[in-house]
Amino acid sequence: MKKRILSAFMLMMTAIGMVFMSGCGKAGKEAELVPVDFTVVSFDDIPKELTAEIESKKSEDFRITYSADGWLYIARGYGMQNSGGYSIAVKEVSMADNAVYFDSELIGPKQGEAVNKLATYPYVVVKLEDAGQSVVFR
């Protein structure tokens, strides 16, 4: 009799454990990301308000979003660098149900490359259709 009760109890605990474990499976998954079409914006095409904000923050690392006329602008700056020769690679602009994801990388001058010795303030601005979602910088 004790064996039956113990077996039934163990079976019930196993079933409860399986229910709780199956619920955790989806919570750990990242939302499916879909690449988004975007344009890297030239200096002359950046909205004046955004240019002013970039100018005020350019000496420090910054992440800025700006919306205007149905467009979302994402700006990423890497602060003051001691020389020229830097570039920025946009690694990701994608969208999930909850947000737009943006990732970029600062690429330094190549070994032995002739660069100016003046301070520079590398940044990139991309433009995409504004879907009204928040932006996650990676």
Image: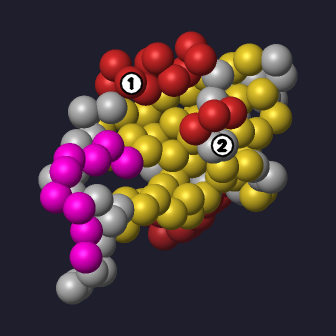
**Residue 70 percent coordinates (x, y):** 83, 22
Amino acid type at circle 1 is: Glu
Note whether 88 is above or below 3 in the view shown: above
Position of 120 with respect to 19 (left or right) is left
**Residue 26 percent coordinates (x, y):** 65, 53
User: Can the viewer see residue 21 in this picture?
Assistant: no
The residue stretch that appears in magenta: 114-122
Position of 81 with respect to 6 (left or right) is left
Position of 95 with respect to 28 (left or right) is right
Question: Foreground: 61 or 14?
Answer: 61
Amino acid type at circle 2 is: Val
Residue plotted at (71% across, 39% down):
127
User: Can the viewer see residue 88 in this picture?
Assistant: yes
Query: Residue 55: which numbered mark, if any?
Result: 1
Label 1 residue SS: helix
**Residue 89 percent coordinates (x, y):** 51, 63
Note whether 46 is above or below 4 in the view shown: above
Residue that mark 2 sits on: 41
